Amino acid sequence: MNSPLYTNILIVGAGPAGLMLAVCLKRLGIDFKIIDKRIPGQLYGQADGIQPRTIELWESLGIAGELLNRGTRVCRSALFVPDEANKNVQLIADGPNVALPEARYPFEILAPVQLIEGIMRDTLTSQGVIIEQPMEPVSVRVIEKEKSPLIEIRLAPVVNQHGDTDIQEIHNTSETIITAKYVIGCDGARSWVRKAMGIEMKGDETIFEWGVMDFTPVTNLPTFRAKTVIQSPLAPFIGYLPRPNRTARIYTLLGRTGSNIIMKSEEGAETSDLIVKATKVGFLPYTMEYQDISWASIYRVKQMIATQYSAQDCVFLVGDACHVHSPLGGQGANVSMADAYNLGWKLAAVLKGQAEASLLKTYEDERRPIALDLLSLDKEIFKCFDSELHFDGLALGGVYMGNAPFLSGLGITYNSSLIKSGNEDLAPGLKLGYRFPSAEILRHCDWNAVHTHDLIQYDGNFKLILLPGDIQNPEVESALIELLFEMDNSELRGHLKVLRDFKTIFRVPRTASLPAFGHSSWLYENCYVDENEAQELHGIYALADVSPYKGVAVLVRPDGYVCTLMPISTETVSLTKAYFDTL
């Protein structure tokens, strides 16, 4: 048996959730190890839809470029319902897939999970991270310490006897012992970590069996490159998604558990044949030929959530390990990666001594309600289906439209001890606990277009964004100069990086002269203006509803969410200190 190894964090599972956490931690300079039960190349699932907010998360980590270039941008969505004769389908709704003005990326990206995982794996590999696989935990125990617990976990390699993806759980005699401060279970719906810590999953299992298939379509369907929902009088629900290289994915409701079609599947009928037979007539009067079928599966939806997201303050669950749901909401890996993004900066802050361990409790406080909301939405979607497999296309479309902010990820709002109320009247358009708005601004010194989200990259630091208003107004200028003087002279400046590394966005034309706040490098890095052709509607001042004569100071968390609002005055320094005293 090998001598024990030590690491700050052991990540169990290298699917989208585990890889996302690893990318976050590596970016923040945190030591970790990551293991996976799968053999290289085996996939956790087939989730392939990336929502607008998830693209923003990837952008903040510097890894969105390849996804944007190689994935399929789904900008259009369509709905077909039965025609008047109830024999064919007709198009009744055709419009933007993401009709949200706050979206920096007004589209979804569809990409194979191989690409999604591959981008993150390549990022980690280029930074020297080794994913140890196939490896799985076989035992775990928490070692009690006076200040903080440690976890001892035994790992063993897994031998794949048959050389395929159905891994036989046969362990070599060689085991590795790892001692870690934190163990993060990102190991899927059948999570070993969750079971080992005695955490239960609560919820329901639906009575319907669904089919999903990837193929190359040959069709005259007019929306063959749009996200399309079809309610046909001749077939069950059809959900059609375009994928890269002119391929597509189709979802359909095959039948109730125990029905004839499901019994045929259990008796060995080809899954793809069942899906083709169930859906082919559903496209009439259009034709659909299914070529180069690459994958097909039948599944039953579970809607479940873990009773808790952590154990003994040192073991945490992320992604499918703590919540499972249907793919009908298009969430898939999105919620899982958002879990990891939320937890990553908090782990880093605690390990670097920037925050108390109690900060980690806010992970469950913030992310579990999101999962509960998702399960509620999932059930609302299922109400559009009756016991005979019929569904109401208009009702389903209404559910999607009514929940678009949540489904896109852009409407996610946190409510925890990290969100401090007060001064909301200074920026009625800024929601506390909501992501900092997406808007285009100009760097004042050279008029280069910059995005507000470029100012709040994922580096583990809180950001202080000053929106002082119209600096050409003497009162506005005076208030800002007093604040900057207080920040520069405060004894807190050396301890609170946020008081040194802040950004200022003025509400003035690009040609306006700015007072001499500092040397040229400070002006280059810190001064921006809200001035573009559409600023009256989509500029940051308009979105936040900030008066150009009062202004507001916005404290933004490392994950890009607004945590508190303050006035443009010397009071901002004391309020900032008070906030950080609570961490």
Image (cartoon, rainbow, N blue to C red):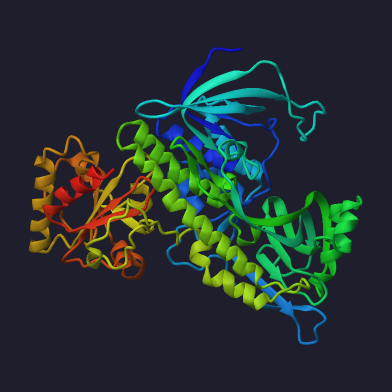
Q: Residue at x 56, y 19 (%)?
A: 177
Image quadrant where residue 424 sits: bottom left
Q: Residue at x 63, y 72 (%)?
A: 396
When the figure is inspected, residue 459 is found, relative to residue 130, above or below; the finding is below
Out of 290 and 354, give the one closest to the viewer.
354
Q: Is 520 placed left or right of 401 in the picture?
A: left
Out of 83 and 69, give the one closest to the viewer.
83
Q: Position of residue 575 (x, y in %)?
A: 18, 51
Q: Position of residue 120 (x, y in %)?
A: 55, 37
Out of 472 and 460, give the one closest to the viewer.
460
Q: Position of residue 577 (x, y in %)?
A: 19, 45
Single out the residue that lies furthest toward the bottom. Answer: 84
Out of 149 and 391, give the one closest to the viewer.
149
Q: Residue at x 66, y 31 (%)?
A: 37
Q: Is 337 placed left or right of 111 in the picture?
A: left
Q: Position of residue 433 (x, y in %)?
A: 36, 57
Count of number-bearing discs? 0
When the figure is inspected, residue 339 is found, relative to residue 536, above or below; the finding is above
Quadrant location, the C terminus: top left
Please indicate, yes or no, whether residue 324 appears anywhere in the rendered image.
no
